[in-house]
Image: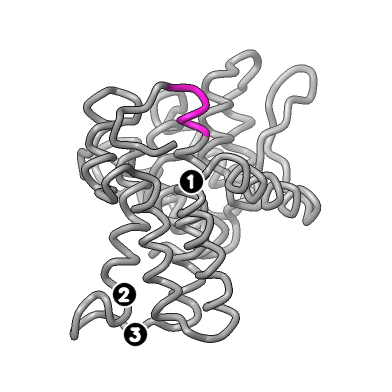
Amino acid sequence: MYGGDLNDEQVDRLAIEIASPITGAQIRRAAERTNTTDLDDRAGWSKEDRLTSYLANVNRSDDIGEVLSILIEKLDLGGNDSLADEIDDILTGSPYTLQYNGKRYELATRTPEDVSNLKDEHSSLIEAAAPLSTQARLERASHLLAEGDYDNAIHDCRRALENMTVDTNYGSALADLDQSGIIEGNDWDEPIDWQALKFPYNYCSNVGSHGGSDAPEATSKRAELAYIYTQEAIVFLLRVAEEENLPDSWDI
């Protein structure tokens, strides 16, 4: 785990998106301007490897906001709405977002009000569009978290995902989305949609007593992580359903 304002997936995805349009000299200049040249270890054989290592290092050192701001400046996202939207999507859930200043996109910090509004928006979408059985499982998980029953809270998070599908086979339904081209596929070499959506299910299946005798203990931190990841996966799927005709395996 990288630690810091961004999670592992965000660091990896940012490196992939930024690597092509940015130059090695621009990376070095960003490091010099932020006094983080010691964190730019130029790991690997490609700009993507280098960026992944560099962003992970500055993320751990709390310099990520300043470095990202300069990298976005170097990208000079004038009218490149597509790349800006992709970067902003990657930053969802972090303290950062992209804003258009009339000429170009620049990094901005989300205010507590922004974060609160985002949470309200996600909760409203779940209440409006998720299957009732999924909503019931999430509500029960929330109560179990408050009561300290972390093991069963994680279990209900897994069930909430399963209840998004017709036959409770979440993995198979994700494969249907992949095969239909609605989400990016299940290549473990890339941090793409399928992985992001499958991860919370795997996590909920392998933590606590439901994961077996060797599974990590269901602590409050792990239960909260499972709950948040589950909610965000559901929100993503609901938004996909708004835009696409999903396979029959989905109940949304």
Residue 91, above or below 180: below
Callout 1, which amino acid? Answer: Pro
Mark 2–mark 3 CB contact (< 8 Å): yes
Query: Callout 1: few (<14), some (14-19), or many (20+) C-alpha neighbours within 10 Å?
Result: some
Residue at the image position 61 percent from the left and 22 percent from the top: 76
Residue wearing tag 2: 207
Residue at the image position 67 percent from the left and 52 percent from the top: 119
Callout 3, which amino acid? Answer: Glu
Residue wearing tag 3: 217
- In the rendered image, residue 65 lying in the magenta stretch gets the answer no
Query: Callout 3: few (<14), some (14-19), or many (20+) C-alpha neighbours within 10 Å?
Result: some
Q: Which mark is residue 131?
A: 1
Residue at the image position 54 percent from the left and 64 percent from the top: 61
Compare residues 114 and 157 and report the one nearer the observer: 157
- Colour convention of the picture: one colour
Is residue 249 among what the camera can see? yes
Residue at the image position 52 percent from the left and 33 percent from the top: 239
Query: Callout 2: few (<14), some (14-19), or many (20+) C-alpha neighbours within 10 Å?
Result: many
Mark 2–mark 1 CB contact (< 8 Å): no
Element marked by disc 2 = loop
Element marked by disc 3 = loop
